[in-house]
Image: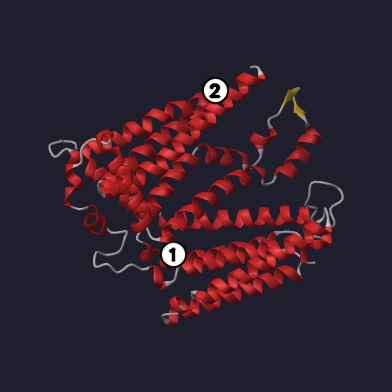
Amino acid sequence: MSTPSRLIWTALSSTARLTAVSSILLFLPLTLSALSPPAFLLLSLLLTIHSLIHSTIRLVLPTLAPYLPFLQVPVHPFLLLFSFNLFSSTTSKLVPWLFEAALLWGKALRLWTPMFVWMEGLASVIVVQATGRTGRVLAERSEEWQVGLLVGAASAYVASATWIVWCYSSIATTPLSSTLLGVALTALIFLTLIGFAQRKTNVIESSLLALYFAYNVWLCSDEHIIDDGHGGYGSEAYWASWVGAGAAAYAPLLSNLLTHLSKLLSFITHTLPKPLLVSLLYRLSILQLASKILPQIGSNSWSDEKEQHGTEDGEEVDWEELRPSGKVTRVLLAYRQTIFVTVYSHLLLLDHSSLVWWRWANVFITLATWAVELLLSQGDDDELVGVSEGVVKGWKVD
């Protein structure tokens, strides 16, 4: 394929992927705002099933992978129209079955709350570790990089402390929440000091973890709990009261597109709380970043193995596939769209006030994960991290 043709194909493929992702981001809240939670859950279930089929074909038949993004473009609008038409009809015999499927899917999403919270914490630690190591390499290039990174880390420390102090009054409303905040903050400080003393962490890693700690503490504050008399923004009664009784009589989407889009805009700007929007943006971003970092974990040792052995029985060996994390990472990356749909649906469905205790659990799980990493990782005196032979090992705590 010539260079112009390759560029055109890449542009078309990227446009198709962006269209598919944008349709998911738009259609799910549109269904939730314009119809009802059951319709939203049904569309979420259909999108999840479609993404499972799409990802399985991509994994089993990699030769078809370049064409799959184009096949997704018409499927998502079709599923949206199907949901709108189905829930606009009062005579459909399929509604009871689909209602049951939607309710079961909603229960499954709520039961998976611990897994989603744990995935966010683990992904955050992975991204923080990768950022810290990248910053350490950049710091050895020049003094300007060192000064810039140190200023950035200091700013992150100050921002974290200010954030915690700012929302302290809405966090320490009970003795238990005050105790949890004190224990978590003490653990963070002690782990940071231990990591500095053993030269196993740096100011970039610790400052980013401090920011993530402050972010979770902010989400645990009572100021985000909505008391509107309907059970919170995650309850069905709340959505029903907002949408109104006329939602059941909606016509097909195409004839009322502008009305639905304006309703969606009003829904996003006035109904969805800011913590929910921030959580959605952060969780999707951190999972995407972690998915790009995972394939590189352990790559150095396996590159050395490849250089030592090279071929096996005269044939080139795919060492990337033989890496312990290679196959698992490949499967996770193949099904990343399914993860994306389920995480997005979960965040739109959840009642934020019910996640406070899971947020506290996530804080301690993240700190425990970081403690294990500090325990198992080598210090800078033994570990060579970088992209060139000129890396100075001692900057990590300078």
Q: Which mark is residue 259?
A: none
Residue bearing the label numbered 2: 63
Outermost residue toward the top in this view: 1
In the rendered image of this protein, does residue 237 appear above or below residue 214? Answer: above
Quadrant in which residue 23 is drawn: top left
Q: Secondary structure at mark 1?
A: helix
Residue bearing the label numbered 1: 358
Q: Is residue 275 left or right of residue 35?
A: right
Rendered location of residue 203, percent (x, y): 71, 65
In the rendered image of this protein, does residue 280 appear above or below residue 14? Answer: below
Q: Secondary structure at mark 2?
A: helix
Q: Nearer the viewer, residue 264 or 315?
A: 264
Rendered location of residue 119, percent (x, y): 51, 54
Q: Amino acid at mark 2?
A: Thr
Q: Nearer the viewer, residue 79 or 46?
A: 79
Q: Earlier in the sequence, mark 1 or mark 2?
A: 2
